[in-house]
Amino acid sequence: MSERTLTEARAADDGAAKGPVALVAPLPGLVSPLAETPDPAFAGGALGDGLAVDPTGATLRAPCAGVIVAVATARHAVTIRAENGAEILLHVGVETVALEGEGFRTLTRAGARVDAGAPLIAFDMDFVARRAKSLVTPVLVVNGEAFAVTRRAAAGEIAEGDFLFEVAPRAVAPATEYKADDETKAEETALVAMPHGIHARPAADIAAAARAFASDVRLVVGAREANARSVSSLMSLGAKMGDAARVLARGRDALEAARAVAALIGPSGRSARRKGDDDPQTEENSVAGPFAGETVLTGVCAAPGFAVGEAVLLAPESREEDYENKGLEVERAALDAAREAARRRLVEAMDGAGQAQRGILRAHADLLDDPELAEAAAARVAAGESALAAWRGVMREQAARMRAMADPRMAERAADFLDLERQVADVLLGRAPQASPMAEGAVLIAEEVYPSQLLRADGARPAAIATAAGGASSHAAILAASLGAPMVVAAGRDLLRAPAGAPVIVDADRGEIVVNPNADRLARARERLARRRARRAQALETARAACRTRDGARIEALANLASPAEARLAVENFAEGCGLLRTEFLFLDRLSPPDEDEQAEQYQAVADALGARPLAIRTLDIGADKPAPYLALEREENPALGLRGLRVGLERRDLLEAQLRAILRVKARGPLQIMLPMVSFSDELAAARAMLDELRAAMGREEPVPLGVMVETPAAALIAGRLAEAADFFSIGTNDLAQYALAIDRGHPGLAGRLDPLHPAVLRLVAMTAEAGAARGRSVSVCGGAASDLAAAAVLVGLGVGRLSAAPARVPEIKAFIRTVTMEECREAARRALAAREAAEVRAIAREIWPHLDEER
């Protein structure tokens, strides 16, 4: 660094206590935008704004004068607070935290005051370059809520000490509603679950979550305390995997804030507790010890149901691998052959597989054919990596990108890439694929279960599946549901302490796992399971009859479907038709959209399976929230409020027109209907109606097809009277309606538990829709999760809903329960529910009117 540049930097800092500060390059090299950093957290701006330097020097220096506020325990990163208060993170390389300090030497300490140009970290460039994903070094502002980058250097070569960027206080300080005298307090405990502790990326996630609340949130690890809103403060904790952390919140939304932050850190004291713990939120018992007695864990329901069985542990594969890099040409050929062999296994497995299994097998085979993945792996081989290392690197990088996506459903697809990594590695290493040790009565317990493990089950069906990680929308969850196996995911690593052979109760509907239940609880669980089976058998015996209330009112009991196989299952369960055919099963998990012929064939197969029963086909409901690669939609800050549902169809008319033509080709024996998802404006319905009429005329189809709308937004419910002028029927999607009405993301770890369609606000929107439909003679159905909930179903009937569309296997029990209620009781429950304060009160009202609801559990 030149003496002149150093002097300028120091002078700028000395006079800028409240103004802008000019930062200089901490390393020589090539400057690039953060967006080009090979890491989604840095590239996406999750950690802050700044620039990146691909270094040609091996000493990281201070970009300005200031105080060192944090030095990473892995010695790969440091945070400096400039004189004006801006906090600057300097992170040497990408994924270097995994090196655990090897190859790095710190030249400063937390609390030290340094001048611009002072040495901070020395590192072995050759060693780090070989072991890490990249040497590219992000330099960024981590307290961006208070400071902004106002000027920056252009991309290109830069010398150590040259101007990098300027950071200045924002014109208006971020507002906070927290008041020091607010006495609302909450405390949660959590076990740090990140493999490398709370480093830059998890710190950014935690800080973002904390800033979403008005309350002040602090994180305490041992004797150290950090402001949860500050990335640098969190990193200064030096929290390692397994450390016990306390989340302290104070403010009007303290409880929600504490729970949201704790959920990001790892398994909490509430998630793993032993019977007899007096206070599960104290530091001493925040983490369950070895399972010596009854232990209750909570997770997320991925496939519904209730089961009792014995724990069977799916151990991770051995990491001992003997693979030799035999040179460019051999490795290139080996990788191509392994990918083809793995793809061939998937194609062969499609024979005799069910619809859900075939769809996932096809998606995996398509991914193995993906040219971008193949080219990325080939490039790594060309750079000198072995076939095994290259494939692993590409698939793990892709998995990381998926995990960084805002949509939980897409984030959970990361497991598919890790699964395919294993499948190709199996071929390269010459080892047999690992199958799940499934047997009748077994509760399969694992860190995470991959689709291929369930697909290789050889027809066996476990009693239940429980995983420490995983997601409720993953392909493994879909397969578990197709097997009829209850599944709970994200139960935390304490689950892996369950002893093999231990009795386990899985109540997936409640997201609860009980390991080593006491004799009384185990006996009650087995009795409950026996009652469920008996009730199910009894419901099936009477399910053939039409669904009516005890006083004779006709209520149609329909099924929600997503494939021809599910249509056959619905008929077996005596569903009276299909109230919702989700057509996304044809459009997702593939590289190109289905053509008109493929769609027509699949819709016809569903219609044939239903016979003379009614069929309501929903048009494509994908978009920024459920992206497909061929849509090429831009990333949205809030995809749930962006281009999705019918909006995508009107934007991409070619897709919607092809789908409508395919539906119009269906020769159904029963009534055929089309319904439009996510309608919020009258002109959206009008545009779709005009398109349908035009296509029908062009195809020479004289018979009109009823066109209805999904009521999934408060806007649609509020203008239901106007929509009823043009819509032929209404179908209420209570899942999305509740999400939008209550402003709670279904995937939010701290709030999703409060998302209940029986909240009076949601019920009032349902009532408005039902009233508008009745005034125009339009049928009103519910096809959301509430239709499968017995208490909710009765209340909905009282509000004026005449059709309930539930999961196929749930139809017999819905019919059986409706036969026990009267319309007068349903209307009384609805009237009282609309006047209630919260969902729990509505459920209490339902149990008061129908005491036998408690017996249904």
Image (cartoon, grey):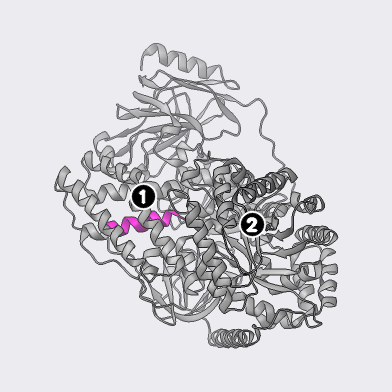
Magenta stretch: residue 415 in it?
yes
Local SS, label 2: loop
Tell me whether circle 2 and circle 1 mark residues in contact (CB < 8 Å): no
Q: Which label lies toward us, 2 or 1?
A: 1
**Of 304 and 358, which appears nearest the observer?**
358
The mark that comes first in sequence, 2 or 1, is: 1
- Residue occupying image coordinates x 43% and y 25%: 63
Q: Is residue 745 magenta?
A: no
Residue 372 shows in this picture: yes
What residue sits 45% from the left and 20% below the top? 153
Amino acid on which disc 2 is placed: Leu
Q: State the mark number for residue 396.
A: 1
Residue 509 or 295: which is nearer the viewer? 509
The residue identified by callout 2 is: 751
Image spot of residue 521 (x, y percent)? 57, 84
Magenta residues?
413-424
Callout 1 amino acid: Arg
Drawn side of residue 452 relative to residue 703, left or right: left
Give the side of residue 91 with respect to residue 665, left or right.
Answer: left
Question: Which residue: 33% across, 70% down?
Answer: 435
| Residue 75, quarter of the rendered image | top left
Q: Residues within 10 Å of mark 1 (few under 14, many from 20)?
A: some
Residue 77 pos. (x, y %): 40, 37
